Amino acid sequence: MVKTDYKGDFPLLLQKDGQGRAIAYLDNAATTQKPRPVIDAVRTYYETYNANPHRGAYDISVRVTEAFEEVRGKVARFIGAADPEEIVFTAGTTDSINLAALSYGEQAVGQGDEILISVLEHHSNLLPWQRLARRTGATLHYLIPDESGRITAEEAAQKLTPRTKIVAITHVSNVLGCVNPIRDIAALAHEKGAVVLLDAAQSAPHIPVDVQALDVDFLAFSGHKLLAPAGVGILYGKKELLRRMEPLRLGGGIVEEVTQQTVRYLDAPWKFEAGTQNAEGVIGLGAAIDYLEEVGMPAIQEIEGRLTRYALEKLSGVSGIRLYGGGTGGTRTGIISFNIDGVHPHDTATVLASHGVAVRAGHHCAQPLMAHMGVNATCRMSLYFYNTEEDIDRLAAALKTVRGVLGLGPQ
Ligand code: C6P
């Protein structure tokens, strides 16, 4: 029997509020809930082998070091990397992109060069490149989405030049949910000699991602958006690129040898992991990947595709609603931004919260995209495979009350 109800694995989703309701959690693009195997893995670590990885010779230190390095291999397999040594543990997507921009970007980009990003980018994949351009005298150019919210290969072909050194682009927009044609864009970028960084914060949790099939040079994602604890993330980098990069943070655990005046660093990825590492986060990430692989990424994509189509249909039936972005099926994931005529999105989110429905409202750390869309903010629902049609029904029903609750007349 194929399992269809996953909520039972997530204690938070079973918890009842003061009115006896479970939360309809539709803010998965912000962070995801944690299944029992992840919570158990973290508890087991603290109860039985908490020690500083890569430091001690005693039993539990060896055990945590082995567990830590085993997760590197799991992550490599999860994203189709050729070698676990291409996997750097970071604090999250933001940290990963900053590492790439500072460590790779500063040596690869110079005066008169171009960096190409898109209007869809989250500030985490914008600000590091904006600063890099300012510091190096490079120019920052933007790919513009089409009406459905996607960056097309044609748009990339037009904006790439022989001066383009880096293309940094999101796989899936955290506002519109559209999936960009990364394989085509990466091929075009490579023809011009540019290196491609993929922000997979909103794709790795939801669709199968294979760095070799996409042929991206760097890839960043966060653990907390795929069932793992917060404070852990990944920077994937092709081996020859990581080898050429200087470590960004300097400190314990990254050297072969130090003298008073010299240092010889460890190889990648360890030279990037200075200081005591987030063993709890990494071990939780390993358990999260095990769980996701048991469900199966193709199954997750299928469940979310079905729920997305259901949500688009339900939300379209709410009068006065405006949905942003387009497409269904393979061209979008379960992120849907919307506004209700004449209602501030924060007010909408507050009314939804009073019904036990959790969505996010605001600019979603994507202000250039908001400006491009001609709005200050949106409400955003975002699905994960543990959501149900009932969650979406509750959202749609609550939305129908918004104008009335705010005294703005019938909807
Ligand atoms: N987006 C959202 O609600 P961190 O915060 O480092 O884990 O992830 C940053 C980040 C980078 N890129 C994309 C596409 C993202 O969506 C995010 C995080 C959350 O949309 C929090 S702002």
Image (cartoon, rainbow, N blue to C red):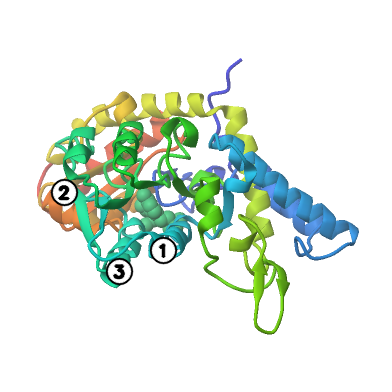
Q: Earlier in the sequence, mark 3 or mark 2?
A: 3
Mark 3 and 1 residues: CB-CB less than 8 Å, in contact?
no
Nearer to us in this view, 406 or 160: 160
- Which mark lies nearer to you, 3 or 2? 3
Question: Which residue is most to the right?
Answer: 58
The residue that label 3 is drawn on is: 136
Nearer to us in this view, 307 or 42: 42
Name the quadrant of the C terminus.
Answer: top left
The residue that label 1 is drawn on is: 107
Q: Secondary structure at mark 2?
A: helix
Q: Secondary structure at mark 1?
A: helix
Residue 225 left/right relative to 287: left
Residue displayed at 29% across by 42% down: 192
- Asked whether residue 233 appears in the rendered view, the answer is no
Q: Estimate the spatial distance between the alpha carbons at disc 3 and disc 2, rounded to whole Å.
A: 50 Å
Q: Secondary structure at mark 3?
A: helix
Q: Estimate the spatial distance between the alpha carbons at disc 2 and disc 1, rounded to whole Å.
A: 54 Å
Nearer to us in this view, 33 or 58: 58
Residue 373 left/right relative to 366: left
